[in-house]
Image: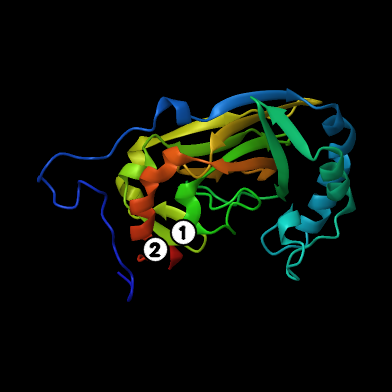
């Protein structure tokens, strides 16, 4: 174990053989739900967006490029992406299930960025990783994740476990499981089918209440993210664990 690294066991499993486990399954209401949308704008504008991001990604060391309006003031972030800007202006929100999901970001990768699931909770809707982790238990971050690729399906790996029953650790602005290897057997996969013309598939889930991770195939990914943050009293159960996490460095941060 590296110097300064702290291991935090799962609640209820700190002492093997003592007591009964307190880890709980993810409530059925929080399981990611499949969405199929018909968006005429996509078939008209997606080629320009994909070409723009693909051109930028070819010169990026990670072979990836994204459009993140919330980070426009960051000098290290590319914001001069007119096709992406036009897409966001013409489709600034999507109504679904009585909620209005606001445009958050576009991202394209030419290569596989992640082969293994790295389960985490988002700290905000705008970028997923620039929010305040100390208030994560006061909000519900509803994510609408769309697969814009016409070539590849997109996989969302997630844990079928309630984060409120696990020991968590803060890694930057992500909140992760403190001991990921102990919970991998509880992982499930939700597949988002590839785009077919103007028919776009996606998933809706509470990204700060479901431990999740996007995993690419060899073709990388091309996604759009919409989201909304609402008051969520039901997420209060995370409070104690996130507070503990604030005093802990995640092993993955090393």
Please determine whether, in this image, residue 140 is positioned above or below residue 70. above
Q: Position of residue 170 (x, y in %)?
A: 43, 60
Q: Residues within 10 Å of mark 2 (few under 14, many from 20)?
A: some
User: In the shown orientation, is residue 99 left or right of residue 246?
Assistant: right
Asked which secondary structure carries label 1, the reply is helix
In the rendering, which numbered label is found on residue 134? 1
Q: Is residue 169 above or below residue 105?
A: below
Mark 1 crowdedness (10 Å alpha carbons): few <14, some 14-19, many ≥20: some
Residue 199 in view here? yes
Please state, as top left, top right, bottom left or bottom right, where the N terminus lies in the image.
bottom left
Residue placed farthest to the bottom in the image? 3
Q: Is there CB contact under 8 Å for labels 1 and 2?
A: yes
Residue 222's disc is none
Residue 115 image position (x, y, % from top left): 52, 47
Q: Name the residue nearer the viewer: 98 or 83.
A: 98
| Distance Cα–Cα, label 1 vs label 2 | 8 Å
Percent of width and height locating residue 9 = 26, 54
Which residue, given by chain and number where applicable, does mark 2 sit on?
Answer: 246
Q: Is 238 situated left or right of 110 in this image?
A: left
Give the mark nearest the N terminus, 1 or 2: 1
Quarter of the figure with the C terminus: bottom left
Q: Secondary structure at mark 2?
A: loop
Q: What sort of colour scheme is used for the picture?
A: rainbow
Q: Position of residue 196 (x, y in %)?
A: 76, 25
Q: In front here: 228 or 26? A: 228
Observer-nearest of 111 and 65: 65
């Amino acid at each position: 174990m590296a110097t300064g690294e702290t291991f935090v066991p799962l609640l209820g499993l700190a002492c093997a053989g003592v007591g009964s486990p307190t880890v709980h399954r993810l409530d059925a209401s929080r399981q990611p739900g499949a969405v199929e949308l018909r968006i005429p704008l996509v078939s008209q504008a997606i080629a320009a967006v994909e070409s723009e991001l693909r051109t930028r990604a070819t010169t990026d060391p990670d072979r990836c490029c994204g459009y993140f309006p919330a980070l426009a003031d960051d000098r290290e972030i590319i914001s001069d992406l007119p096709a992406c800007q036009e897409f966001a202006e013409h489709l600034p929100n999507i109504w679904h299930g009585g909620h209005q999901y606001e445009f958050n970001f576009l991202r394209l990768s030419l290569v596989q960025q992640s082969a293994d699931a790295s389960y985490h909770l988002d700290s905000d809707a705008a970028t997923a990783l620039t929010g305040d982790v100390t208030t994560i238990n006061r909000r519900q971050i509803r994510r609408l994740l769309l697969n814009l690729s016409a070539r590849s399906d997109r996989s969302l790996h997630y844990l079928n476990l309630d984060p409120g029953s696990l020991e968590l650790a803060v890694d930057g602005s992500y909140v992760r499981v403190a001991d990921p290897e102990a919970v991998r057997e509880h992982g499930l996969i939700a597949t988002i089918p590839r785009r077919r013309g103007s028919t776009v598939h996606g998933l809706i889930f509470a990204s700060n209440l479901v431990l999740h991770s996007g995993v690419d195939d060899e073709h990388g990914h091309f996604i759009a993210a919409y989201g909304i943050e609402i008051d969520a009293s039901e997420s209060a159960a995370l409070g104690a664990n996130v507070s503990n996490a604030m005093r802990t460095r995640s092993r993955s941060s090393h």
